[in-house]
Amino acid sequence: MEVTNFSPIIPQPYPWLIICDGKNQERQTLVNISDNHFKSMTIPEMRNKPICTSTKEWLVLKDLDSMDLCLLNLTSKDVVQLPRLESTIRTDICILSSPESESIHDCHVMFIDGLTFYFCQPGDKKFSEQVFEFDLEGRLMWIPTATMVRGKVYFLTIVSEGPNELFTAEFVNSSLHFTKFTSKNLPMPLPTEIVDYLVESSGELLFIQKMRGGWKFNKILGFSIFRMDFSSQMWVQVNNIRGQTIFLSQPYGLKHKAISCFAREKGIRKNSIYFTKCSDRYIYIFDLEDHSISKSLSCPIVSKHNSRLDWVMIP
């Protein structure tokens, strides 16, 4: 690895790996995984603030001290304050929609906790709250993952019996309208510990199952990927994602963030899944063709046990 001293965070067609470490996560190290260069800096606006999600150059940050929420533009360093949420509300699942104009005030910020949706736009005084209620004969338990595709929020629901259900949410005036997406063959839960991801991939919807085992389920056994065929509303299992690469984040509790992009650059492995683990500074790569898992050191100067790794796309 080589350290570079340039300060601007430049756009690129694949994600930056951002590593936060230090006593209060005050240091940020940006790693270019294509050429193995990295640069360390201090971004005061990110001190002790995990990244909830990101869209384009905008990050949703949560202050672990004050529990305040804000938007940060990584290129301009502009900060937009968001309303507060109660400290008991989990922020594991977060969605930031792309603004319809050049103004960030046109976007929506959404958190999902259990079966409750919290959403706002920059400038709002408080978050709106709406409980997801749908007649599933008492089988509905919680929502584990969500993503935005073609202007709609797709989210998975875990049920106590039978296959999980897929729904969409759309903004209608100042509230959310929920619709059941009648997929005919949503994959059944596997007989092992799994983490579910929904990810937008070039306008398509992918459903990813990460299978875990071993001590405290810290060993990754493999992945299964399904693509939604919107014309037939069927999930199709795929072993080839056609030159694309998927990046999965798992910094502490925020374990359902995913990015997909075309692997056009040298040094980016196609048809692979890059993923990270909690309290671990290594990058792991799952090859979809031979199902092998390799790893590499993300950066030699960051903390071995207290680093938070996250993928951020700056297109």
Image (cartoon, rainbow, N blue to C red):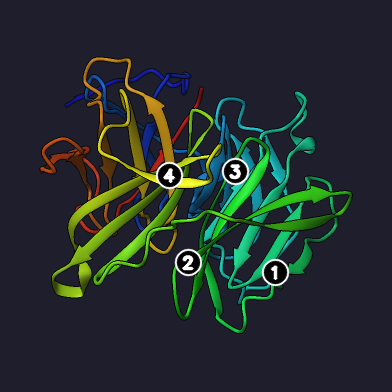
* Helix, strand or loop for disc 3: strand
- At horizontal 87% and vertical 53% (from top left) the residue drawn is 174
Left or right of residue 253, residue 123 in this image:
right
Q: Which residue is mark 3?
A: 148
Residue 178 x/y as whole percent = 72, 58
* Displayed quadrant of residue 265: top left
Tell which circle, 2 or 3, labels the residue nearer the N-terminal end: 3
Query: Which label is found at residue 132?
Result: 1
Q: Which residue is mark 4?
A: 258
Q: Which residue is mark 2?
A: 164
- Mark 2, mark 3: which one is toward the viewer? 2
* Displayed quadrant of residue 54: top right
* Helix, strand or loop for disc 2: loop
- At horizontal 61% and vertical 39% (from top left) the residue drawn is 72
Tell which circle, 1 or 2, labels the residue nearer the N-terminal end: 1
| Label 4 – label 3 distance at C-alpha | 11 Å
| Label 2 – label 4 distance at C-alpha | 20 Å
Report crowding for label 1: few under 14, some 14 to 19, many 20 or more residues within 10 A (C-alpha). some
The quadrant of the rendering that contains the N terminus is top left
Q: Amino acid at mark 4?
A: Ala
